[in-house]
Image (spheres, coloured by chain):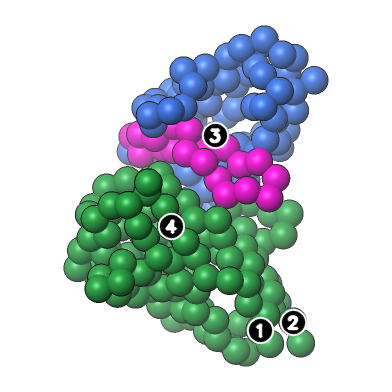
Amino acid sequence: QVQLVQSGAEVKKPGASVKVSCKASGYTFTTYGINWVRQAPGQGLEWMGWISTYNGNTNYAQRLQGRVTMTTDTSTSTAYMDLRSLRSDDTAVYYCARGRMRYFDGSTDVWGKGTTVTVSS
Amino acid sequence: QSALTQPASVSGSPGQSITISCTGTSSDVGGYNYVSWYQQHPGKAPKLMIYDVSNRPSGVSNRFSGSKSGNTASLTISGLQAEDEADYYCGSYTSSNTVVFGGGTKLTVL
């Protein structure tokens, strides 16, 4: 079945970087893009960006531009989200979510279970 | 990009129908038929319930329906069941080629 398996929880100090992985299975990886969405404790969903698994094109949320990089490794069907210069308000559950289409239309269907990232000194 | 506006909470009794609104602008909800709705139970990942304003993914109950008028999209749940109690989020494609979510609505089944 289609699933996205994310890497384990991380604890980081302010100013550090974190890289979260998302391994896809059950479908052809390059057919659908991957979105990253985060959710701070007790808060709503925040879209972070999207990457085309077909050609590597990216769209990032403006407020994260310059701090976030999304990449893929098609040989292992894995997407990565790298967030730098971490602050306490980056503490959140980070989700990867498959786009419904190869092109970007903002919709997602299958979600990973989430990766908890805690930023604390 | 400001978040889409949803009511913080709605409630209904089993068997009743409820509607959750999601208000944006002509740059997001009103400008495109790319509105999605997600259900999230505590401690779980969101689940897609509606895409492209009114389409249901395979496996989602037909008690869930979506619509749009102008800059406001709506999710209607008919025949409320206890298992429908969850948080619901709308999301829309925007003219900036990004996604904006609503703040979320907590549904309580009385």
Q: Name the residue carrying label 2.
A: A120
Q: Label 3 is found on which chain of the structure?
A: B
Cα–Cα span, label 3 and label 2: 35 Å
Q: Which residues are magenta?
A: B33-52
Q: Colour of chain A?
A: green
Cα–Cα span, label 1 and label 4: 23 Å
Q: Label 4 is found on which chain of the structure?
A: A
- Residue A103 image position (x, y, % from top left): 24, 53
Q: Residue A72 falls in which quadrant of the image?
A: bottom left
Q: Are marks 4 and 3 on the same chain?
A: no
Q: Are marks 1 and 4 on the same chain?
A: yes
Q: Does residue A59 appear in the picture of this structure?
A: no
Q: Amino acid at mark 1?
A: Lys
Q: Label 1 is found on which chain of the structure?
A: A
Q: Amino acid at mark 3?
A: Cys
Q: Amino acid at mark 2?
A: Ser
Q: Name the residue carrying label 3.
A: B22
